[in-house]
Amino acid sequence: MTFREKLQQELPTFVNEKWWGGCNGCPDTYGYEIESDCIALDDETDEDKKRHCTECWDREAPKEREEPKEMTFAEIEQALGHPVKIVGDSHESDQ
């Protein structure tokens, strides 16, 4: 998925040909990147800005990492291929 496709999916009103490159702002404006290395800032013509912004928005967005999920003992045993033996209980109180 490109940055443009992601913006179109999340905020379609910000994808419009009235902006350079067809999108309002830069990918980092929406948190898609930490910081962009915008080469369009140094462009002197509107045509160059449009071309560079289009190229930027049409780049592949990095895949989002999935949050790790907690596994059950059965899933752990299946993944390891052998039973798991629990030694001690970290939830015991010292009463």
Image: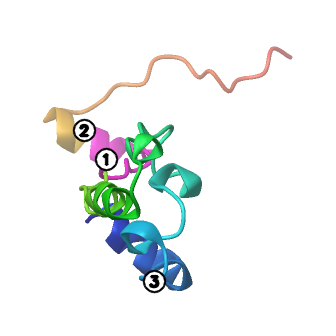
- Asked if 21 appears above or below 60 in the picture, the reply is below
- Asked if 4 appears above or below 61 in the picture, the reply is below
- First along the sequence among labels 3 and 1: 3
Q: Residue furthest right?
A: 95
Between 11 and 72, the one lying in front of the other is 11
Q: CA distance from mark 3 to mark 1?
A: 50 Å
For the record, the magenta segment spans 62-76
SS under mark 3: loop
Q: Which mark is residue 74?
A: 1
Magenta: main secondary structure equals loop
Tag nearer the camera, 3 or 2: 3
Between 38 and 47, the one lying in front of the other is 47
| Rendering coords of residue 32 (x, y %) | 46, 52
Q: Which mark is residue 16?
A: 3
Between 77 and 62, the one lying in front of the other is 62
SS under mark 2: helix
Q: Quadrant of residue 13?
A: bottom right
Q: Quadrant of the N terminus?
A: bottom left
Residue located 25% across and 38% down the image: 77
Q: Amino acid at mark 2?
A: Glu
Tag nearer the camera, 3 or 1: 3
Residue located 37% across and 68% down the image: 21
Residue located 39% across and 50% down the image: 66
Q: Residue tagged by mark 2?
A: 77
Q: Quadrant of residue 54?
A: bottom left
**Is the residue marked by circle 3 packed among few (<14), some (14-19), or many (20+) residues within 10 Å?**
few
| Rendering coords of residue 7 (x, y %) | 44, 71
- Asked if 87 appears above or below 48 in the picture, the reply is above
